[in-house]
Image: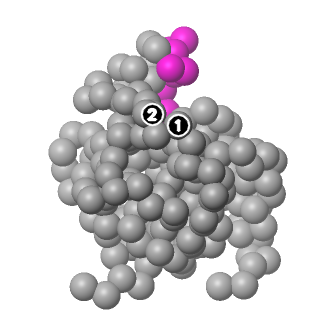
Amino acid sequence: MAVNSVYDFIMETLERKAAPLSIFRGKVLLIVNVYHRMNALMDMYGGLNFIVLGFPCNQFGLQENHETLNILQYVRPGRGFLPKFPIFSRIEVNGSDEHPLYAYLKETLPFVNPVIGDIRKLYWSPIKANDIRWNFEKFLITADGVPYKRYDPHCPFEEVERDIATLLQGRHLS
């Protein structure tokens, strides 16, 4: 199947139901594996054709498990946290079993970081230069479903906010 946008993918919800990403057509998307500050983004931009999509992954220090929502609510970030955005079933974003969505994102927006990190905390094989390094990487997607920008784990959050605002105002090149 030729992939033209993220809308070509069908993902699985936490309830194990198929969810075509095409239901988000026309919205700017931020695809993440981490939830810190994502509710704040939804508060800022959620009413403006923007949504965060969360994809739990257990390949970074074995931090995710099958009880994703309970972990978020009671452990990390805790204090009764409830996401204001959809969270899908856990997937692999690297290695031989990486999900096709992440293969597409990494192929479209390559990022070659010469520092791989502590391989004892990386739970996939083979390790490739273009892999997601840690669960704080994010992918920003245009309202047309086209990958726009990839953020490394150390990118200032304000840059992500500015880029979202830029896409929402239609000031970008597709």
Q: Is residue 78 magenta?
A: yes
**Number of residues whose C-alpha sits closer than 10 Å to that of mark 1, classed few (under 14), some (14–19) or many (20 or more):** few
Which secondary structure, mark 1?
A: loop
Left or right: residue 56 compared with residue 164: left
**Number of residues whose C-alpha sits closer than 10 Å to that of mark 2, classed few (under 14), some (14–19) or many (20 or more):** few
Instruction: Give the numbered dot on residue 121.
Output: 2
- Image point (51%, 63%), residue name: 129
- Image point (31%, 42%), residue name: 90
Instruction: Look at the image and give the residue range highlighted in magenta.
Output: 76-83
Q: Is residue 38 magenta?
A: no
Q: Is residue 49 visible?
A: no
Measured as percent of width and height from the top left, residue 117 is found at 57, 42
Left or right: residue 102 compared with residue 50: left
Left or right: residue 23 compared with residue 143: left
What residue is shown with label 1? 118
> What amino acid type should be assigned to the residue bearing mark 2?
Lys
